[in-house]
Image (cartoon, coloured by chain):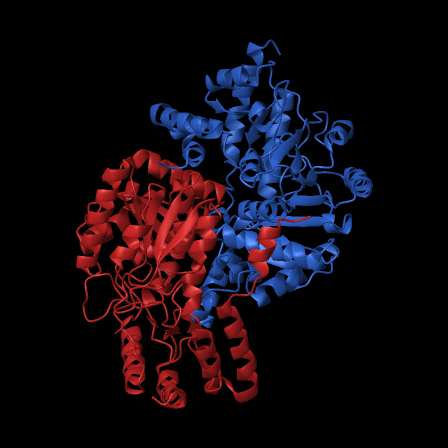
Chain colours: A red, B blue
Amino acid sequence: MIAEKMYELGTKKSTIRTIFEFGRKRAAEVGEENIYDFSLGNPNVPSPECVKQAVFDILNEMEPCAVHGYTVAPGDPAVRESLAASLNTRFGTKFSGKNLFMTAGAAAAITITFKALSEAEDEFITFAPFFPEYRCFVESTGAKLIVVPARTVDFQIDFAAFADLLTPHTKAVIVNSPNNRSGSVYSEATIRKLTALLEEKEREYGHPIFLISDEPYREIAYDGIDVPYLTKYYNNTIVCYSYSKSLSLPGERIGYIVVPDEIIDFGRVYGAIAGAGRVLTHVNAPSLFQRVIARCADETSDLAFYEKNGKLLYNGLIAAGFTCVKPQGAFYLFPKALEEDDYAFCERAKKYDLLLVPGTDFGCPGYFRAAYCIKTETIERSLPLFKKLAAEYNI
Amino acid sequence: MIAEKMYELGTKKSTIRTIFEFGRKRAAEVGEENIYDFSLGNPNVPSPECVKQAVFDILNEMEPCAVHGYTVAPGDPAVRESLAASLNTRFGTKFSGKNLFMTAGAAAAITITFKALSEAEDEFITFAPFFPEYRCFVESTGAKLIVVPARTVDFQIDFAAFADLLTPHTKAVIVNSPNNRSGSVYSEATIRKLTALLEEKEREYGHPIFLISDEPYREIAYDGIDVPYLTKYYNNTIVCYSYSKSLSLPGERIGYIVVPDEIIDFGRVYGAIAGAGRVLTHVNAPSLFQRVIARCADETSDLAFYEKNGKLLYNGLIAAGFTCVKPQGAFYLFPKALEEDDYAFCERAKKYDLLLVPGTDFGCPGYFRAAYCIKTETIERSLPLFKKLAAEYNI
């Protein structure tokens, strides 16, 4: 009667959703302030004032039909030129507007890219811990998602494991740095080793392997750490970006795809992206917010807030006896669970109303994710509870 | 290397696009004012003042994280309640928020619906003249689009032809009234005959046949004509709506799907819609504009402008000797071409810089489409040219 697969995808409750609902129920029982919900990765820093000002200015300056009308499918040409100029200034790239394709956020950007590239028997590789939606998005194009196990010592790449998984079917490799899950940033050394291996395999297989950089957390990187811009390291790179985190606009669905001139066949890749956008009915990225981000391209929300939170939680967990890689960006810690079974560990944490997500959900058992895009004060008050939890394990 | 089908869909130039580009070239040669571009269906009436006011009020009243944050996938619950209440007042329906699923416009709404319903060997039926993107959207789900030839005398339904095309594979029937192409509105008699036939076939085949009402032009109907609200006539109806025309917001991508309680299995249909939205990466409909339309749900742009234009063009064409069904809504006329070959006719019209779209593109050869969402003055100045064109055919 209906598409069973769609029903399943639309109704199966994710672990995060289940935890969130548990949190709501507990909040009603014991009060909002006694719930320590580290489960959701929603930006909690307000958009900068320039966003509001840009909206007001645009509506005051432009005719409604111009603001709210269709743009061409790849996005308003002037907007794309502005964003390309901003990228060039910040990252030393040489893009022009034609290299950008505006999208409804990074989810649309990556799915459009997957669909544009995917052919029969293709494999897309990514690295644990990973965004579980990758599986849904890759599989919906008919391709397979292959997951490289995590290198838990620092959440860089386990190259031996990765090399074993590359095959002539490998269409693309998906990286996400700064990483949603581990909070790590791929170093330049990692990127150089990765791109050298991909170039070697491209020669060996006689076909391109695309490097898809899913990078909505690009601007959230700590201690001045460098987040390499991947088109400068590897020709067949496609960048998928979103303003959800940098300008705290996740609900507005605005981002872009970059297809650099250096890619193997620019016209064919860009054309396929346009076709995939059409089939996925992303007619154009929301028109007002295309103009808003063009005016705010060099601005961000107060991202230092996340750095402060990350260090507070990291130091607290280390003091409580946890093992955890130091956060380098995004707004997540990915500590080792205090028992092998991360589900059992997260269940036990619930006793203290500490809501954590088991790493198994992200392809990395024995760990858990703590999203710290929450009130600083909540983190402060959670630390004694993490200590109590650790004490249960005699740590 | 890439998905060939996506490349093809992303780069094949449509007839309308080709005509539009010809118009731009001619405008550079002879001046904008001497081009009579009836090819594009873009609303040209500004959004009502309430849209701007709503944006300002929302940004002044609400916290940025609340305005721009993710909403739940089906859309903000309060927004859906407001829209349901507005529908109930205007159309005597009994919806609540849970019957609505907010989408990025009608294109997303129909594609999500197609994908939610589509199973192996399914057929979706629609009526010429039709929106050519239906083919792309339906085929992308793996189903087939079946087109019922036009009933050109009044652009109601040719029931004999329709009945012949219904089969046990028929999953759904897509109607679009007021019609983008013909400008006709299905009468209540047509709707009653259609739904009686569908009910009969449901019994005969032993499975539901969904009626998908793609109705972005609902509010553009002339002379007070009634546009029946289809959930009141047929249980297995799904309504796909957009604010692109009523509030002139096509670039903002905002609309919704209605799944009525009366549908055969509400939970399964709504769940599959959620899954299809997820796979097509419509994470949530743009969050600011969800709130904007909730505040403007009972308002419209100055839609009387289209009625005035439609009558002016219709009377002019009739006076020039054309045959044309009187416009009832939307912003299109669909007259008979003055020779059998509508492509040749539209080519000849170009001599006068009259840019028209051949009906063959919409499954209705021998006719042409004239979109009159343009300046009234342009229509006035075009009428003598239509006369000259008709004179070439000795009319």
**At which x and y percent is residue B262?**
75, 56
Q: Nearer the viewer, residue B391 or B297?
A: B297
The quarter of the picture where residue B353 lies is top left
Q: Indicate the position of residue B160 as horizontal and vertical percent values.
A: 78, 27
- Above or below, A387 relative to A131: below
- Residue at 61% from the left image edge and 21% from the top image edge: B365
Residue B296 visible, this angle? no
User: In the picture, residue B27 is in which quadrant?
Assistant: top left
Q: Nearer the viewer, residue A44 or A359?
A: A359
Q: Residue at x 39, y 50 (%)?
A: A109
Estimate the x, y position of residue B120 in percent, counting from the top left: 62, 40
Q: Is residue B20 left or right of residue A173?
A: right
Pick the front one: B108 or B92: B108
Q: Position of residue A293 (x, y in %)?
A: 34, 56
**Count of marks placed on residues:** 0
| Location of the C terminus of chain A (image quadrant) | bottom left
**Residue visible at 34% across and 44% down in the picture:** A170
Q: Is residue A115 visible?
A: yes
On screen, residue B127 versus residue A175, left or right, reads right
Q: Viewed as shown, does residue A103 lie left or right of B48?
A: left
- Compared with A369, A297 (above or below) is above
Q: Measured along the vertical axis of the image, is residue B219 above or below residue B180?
A: below
In this orientation, which residue lies closer to the viewer: A233 or A393?
A393
Judged left or right of residue B198, residue A114 is left
